[in-house]
Image (cartoon, rainbow, N blue to C red):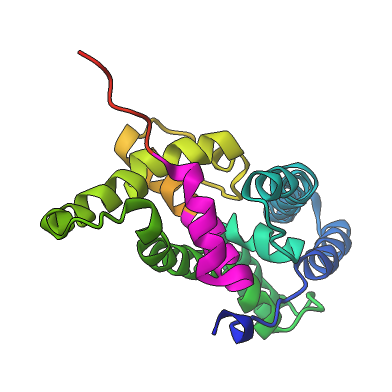
Amino acid sequence: MHRWLTWNLPGIEGRLTTLREDLVRETSALPPGESGKFGRWVREIETVFAKAAVITGTVQPEVEADLGYSLGDREQFVIAMFRPSTRNLFDEIAEDARSGGWCTLTDAELRDLAHLHEAAGALAWIGDAALKIGLLPAIWDQEIANAGNLTENRKAYDRNSNLALLCDRWSLYEHRIHFDAEIPRSARTINHAKGTLVESVFGILFLREGLKGVASATELLRPPPPRRR
């Protein structure tokens, strides 16, 4: 089934390059006092480029080496790292472009960029669902009397605090693509974000290799042994 579950990827690098060129051209034509937001948009697009370069050049190869599988197209892995705060950038640009007529991208192309975080969320949902089944070989107990332990055993693997350990190993959280304000966040909130990033990776793995690939990679999620008192 997983073999035909594919997306028509938008070509992020090409679209962002065009968008940056359009913004730079329009900025040079504006009076100094009116170019502030264009400069901010250019800087934020440059941030996306910089993060994407590290993701494709360093993060994805290290994740693939750990998993023992190729995750395929670099663009899909970059998409998995987009967070909801990126939508504001592209929505703001689209609104200005509609009235100003300066952008050579179509409204639909800008809308694709604004919704990349939703594709990332879909990958996380797929990964979460795949893990629930893919974990079975790791948690299965042949003693029928222990069947009631399956849920708790699964939770030990796929709870956010455990997924966060793998997120840290892969350095996903610090390389996520976002424009969130740098404010203190609770450990629970951070672990939820980290867990979602790991689920996105497992979503890609499922789409590439199916449940067999997910099952083999769950060894990376084996919970640490309980501390001795």
Residue 212 percent location from the top left of the image? 53, 66
Res 84 visible: no
Residue 221 percent location from the top left of the image? 44, 44
Q: Nearer the viewer, residue 94 or 162?
A: 162
Question: Eyeballing the image, is 204 above or below 48?
Answer: below
Residue lying at 63% horizontally and 82% vertically, measured from the top left: 3
Residue lying at 63% horizontally and 76% vertically, measured from the top left: 112
Assess whether residue 170 is covered by the magenta stretch.
Answer: no
Residue lying at 41% horizontally and 41% vertically, measured from the top left: 222
Residue 116 percent location from the top left of the image? 59, 68
The quarter of the picture where the N terminus appears is bottom right
Assess whether residue 205 is covered by the magenta stretch.
Answer: yes
Magenta region: 199-222
Q: Nearer the viewer, residue 156 or 181?
A: 156
Residue lying at 51% horizontally and 43% vertically, measured from the top left: 220
Question: Eyeballing the image, is 219 above or below 37?
Answer: above
- Judged by its main secondary structure, the magenta piece is helix
Residue lying furthest front = 143
- Position of 196 with respect to 203 (left or right) is left
The quarter of the picture where the C terminus appears is top left
Q: Quadrant of residue 142?
A: bottom left
Res 41 visible: yes
Q: Nearer the viewer, residue 121 or 1?
A: 1
- Position of 64 with respect to 164 (left or right) is right
